[in-house]
Amino acid sequence: MTSRLLLYSMYDVAGPDRGPVVRIERMRVALESRCQLSMLSGGRAARIPRLLRWLAKGGLGSIDGIYVEASSSFATPVDLAFLAFARARRKPVGVYFRDAYQLYRGEYPLSRRRQRLLDWLWRISTPILKRVASRRFAPSAGLAAALGLDSPILLPPGVDPGLPFLGAGNAPVVAYVGSLGPGDGVPLLVQAMSGVRERVADASLRIVAPDDPRAILGPLPPWVTWVRAGRDELSGTLRDVRVCVIPRPITPYTNLAVPLKLFDFLAFGKPVVATACSETERILGPTDAGLLVRDAPAPLADAIVRVLTDDALALRLASGARRLAEDPTMSWSARADTVVAGLHGR
């Protein structure tokens, strides 16, 4: 008998192609191939009336369980009441806890009154959300431990091997893709690139980010360029790139976080240089898909230079990256299978 699930997204999936939105859409497609799927989504203001209309039409009677893509911000009282009501109706509720940066205010300090309010709401709602969930999904064991999740189910990362295999580009271009927050390590990478250019004079750094890095980092050297590219433009933006870098400082928070950009790099077949944060090392360490280094300019520069100057190494890393991306246990199908099995207690 085909399972009937509700995908309850605390994000507006019609919004910008931010990481969570893109990945929720991938999850929707994977789940649809495995069960009869309904979906409720939206920001806080939009999803509540949609939920109430769905309930008024007897929506709970049309499903066997609920999979929740929880916001990294907070669950509203209506969200919590709905999920508790579903549990009371004997519907399994699986919640995916994607982040816990609120527990690491040394790295993510509060600076505005609104941030303090959101932090307070997260600290109130998250323990309740953990209690109303009958299954608790997480991206890593470290995050599950930080949140104190009982019997967590770890989800495969979700890699899209349908992305084009680009391989190691021929240009001496180093790429960074992502946001420019304090835990992302872009200043470390810029510093390392100064050392790279002492040995590879024409090396350049391409920062692919939604915001102008100069507004955060100040003036940048002329060999640093900024590109604003959505997901659809990413393959073209990275085509000539030789190596993609994940330069996160190694901290208690980055040790438990899974860098989602890594999985696109793997699918594109791009050589990867990354700092040896625990989750990144867990994924790349047993493979030949990337080089892992300490979070310091010199070792980061050394690894980048190796990939820029050693064609055989770059080819081997590119092949290893794509091979890892094609591993069935890393796929969106495996992720959806884990959710369906988890909700049914298997």
Image (cartoon, rainbow, N blue to C red):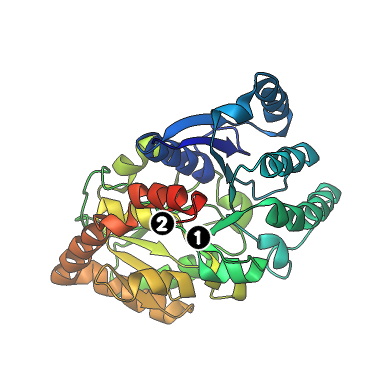
- Mark 1, Cα crowd under 10 Å, few <14 / some 14-19 / many 20+, is many
At x 43% / y 51%, what residue is drawn? 341
Residue 49 shows in this picture: yes
At x 50% / y 60%, what residue is drawn? 139
Residue 227 circle label: none
Helix, strand or loop for disc 1: loop
Q: Does the CB distance between marks 2 and 1 fall below 8 Å?
A: yes
Q: Which residue is mark 2?
A: 157
**What's the distance in space between the residues labelled 2 and 1, CA to CA?**
7 Å
Q: Return the x and y of residue 181 as percentages of the image width and height.
A: 60, 58
Q: Return the x and y of residue 308 as percentages of the image width and height.
A: 25, 67
Sequence-earlier tag: 2 or 1:
1
Q: Quadrant of residue 288?
A: bottom left
Q: How many marks?
A: 2
Q: Return the x and y of residue 223 as percentages of the image width and height.
A: 40, 57
Give left or right: position of 309 versus 277.
left
Q: Amino acid at mark 1?
A: Pro
- Mark 2, Cα crowd under 10 Å, few <14 / some 14-19 / many 20+, is many
Residue 218 shows in this picture: no
Identify which residue, 1 or 70, lies in the foreground: 1
Quadrant of the drawing holding the C terminus? bottom left
Helix, strand or loop for disc 2: loop
At x 35% / y 52%, what residue is drawn? 334
Quadrant of the drawing holding the N terminus? top left
Extreme residue in the left direction = 312
Q: Amino acid at mark 2?
A: Pro
In this rendering, the answer to whether 164 lies above or below 271 is above
Give left or right: position of 177 versus 166.
right
Q: Return the x and y of residue 18 as percentages of the image width and height.
A: 52, 41
Q: Which residue is mark 1?
A: 139
Identify which residue, 164 or 283, lies in the foreground: 283
